[in-house]
Amino acid sequence: MIFCSIRAALLISLIAVLSVLARTAKPRSRGRGSRWWSLAYSEEPTNLVVDFQRANLVSLKGSSPLLPLRKKQQRLVRDNPGAMAAIGRGVKVAITECKHQLRKRRWNCPTTDYARGKNIFGKIVQKGCRETAFLYAITSAGVTHALSRACREGLVSTCSCDYRRRGPSGLDWEWGGCSDNIEFGAKFSRQFVDAAERGKDLRYIMNIHNNEAGRTHVVAGMRRQCKCHGMSGSCTVQTCWMQLPPFRAVGEGLKDRFDGASRVLVTNRGNVRRRALLKPYHPEHKPPSKKDLVYFESSPDFCFPDVSLGHGGTLGRSCNESSIGLDGCDLMCCGRGFKTENREEHSRCNCTFHWCCQVECKMCKMKKIVNSCL
């Protein structure tokens, strides 16, 4: 009888412990779809299509070839020699643009050590917050942009310029030239980037939506570019083609959507791949569009270092004393105060051009006032 009572008590205790663990444990799948971002730091592969081994089977520093890629992603890069190099360039551009667009915010897109299999942005990707939404959108846009341009430059064996627009199209201009292949770039990005995601929960839907939002901004930014032809530059007729937008313009568009990102819930209707499944967290808000970024968790305040999320807080960050925005010293420093320093910097000045072809400059000292958070 005593033995049965002890066994029952142990069983109840075990159930209680498992229940606590189930409530506190984070889903292991969160953020795993972003591991391919570390391809930005892969060994630089050649762009020669004939060199298959180096063009696709590149390895990360301290890891084995294709470690961060799922099977479908591996198949895509094997079937499209030269694509791996373009993907790496796309992620690098995305990282640079992320740091530029968020440079005045507490979370300024910090990157971490990638050599031991960590995510390059840290564990912030495990949260379904607006910062994570921006990362997924900007990296998806980077791959779309890079693949579309690589096709035009002949760096991927399975695609080339987009020649769909050919022939007369206006009174003083006609289609011609070599257009960036946005159709291939967007399709490849959709197959490659979305293949990294798993599950059917809200986080999966959030990632897929933000991936598509990044691609949509690139596609929407395509513009007609023309070149004049005629005697003495008379521009009698123009040859025109479609050209990608500068990635800075894509980043600015996504930054605007980041500032106005939509907090969402999931509905019980429709297919998980459709935006109709997302509804606003606040009923009075409108449903998110294809260009909007979505999230479902509040962001940390990022005031103090958090090793688990991979950011160092705002200690030592520069701030603008006169600004009332997020880069202002009051908000950036989280009310802790700031210190002011007078720094002396050297820069080139009084440059003169000498024929031909040399520029000579003097080195000037400049005093600069710098505020930094305590």
Image (cartoon, rainbow, N blue to C red):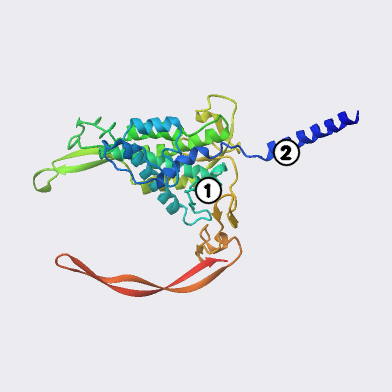
Residue occupying the point 50% across, 28% down? 274
Quarter where residue 147 is shown? top left
The residue that appears at 51% across and 68% down in the rendered structure is: 371
Any mark on residue 20, and which?
2
Q: CA distance from mark 2 to mark 1?
A: 26 Å
Q: Residue at x 30, y 40 (%)?
A: 149
Q: Amino acid at mark 2?
A: Val
Which element carries disc 1, helix, strand or loop? helix
Furthest toward the right, the residue is 1
Q: Quadrant of the N terminus?
A: top right
Between 236 and 58, which is closer to the camera in this rendering? 58
Q: Would you call the spot at circle 1 few (<14 residues within 10 Å), some (14-19), or many (20 or more)?
A: many
Indicate the position of residue 281 as horizontal and vertical percent values. Answer: 60, 38
Counting other residues with Cα less than 10 Å from the Cα at mark 2, is it few (<14), some (14-19), or many (20 or more)? few
Relative to residue 38, is residue 71 depicted above or below? above
Instruction: Residue at the far left: name it.
Output: 231
Indicate the quadrant containing the C terminus: top left, top right, bottom left or bottom right. Answer: bottom right
Q: Which residue is denoted by mark 1 in the rendering?
A: 122
Q: Position of residue 84 (x, y in %)?
A: 36, 39
160 vs 323, nearest the viewer: 160
Residue 37 percent across, percent down from the top left: 44, 43
* Of pointers 2 and 1, the one earlier in the residue sequence: 2
Pick the residue in front: 105 or 191.
Answer: 191
Q: Please name whichever residue, 195 or 332, is drawn nearer the observer in this view of the structure.
A: 195
Q: Quadrant of residue 230?
A: top left
Amino acid, disc 1: Gly
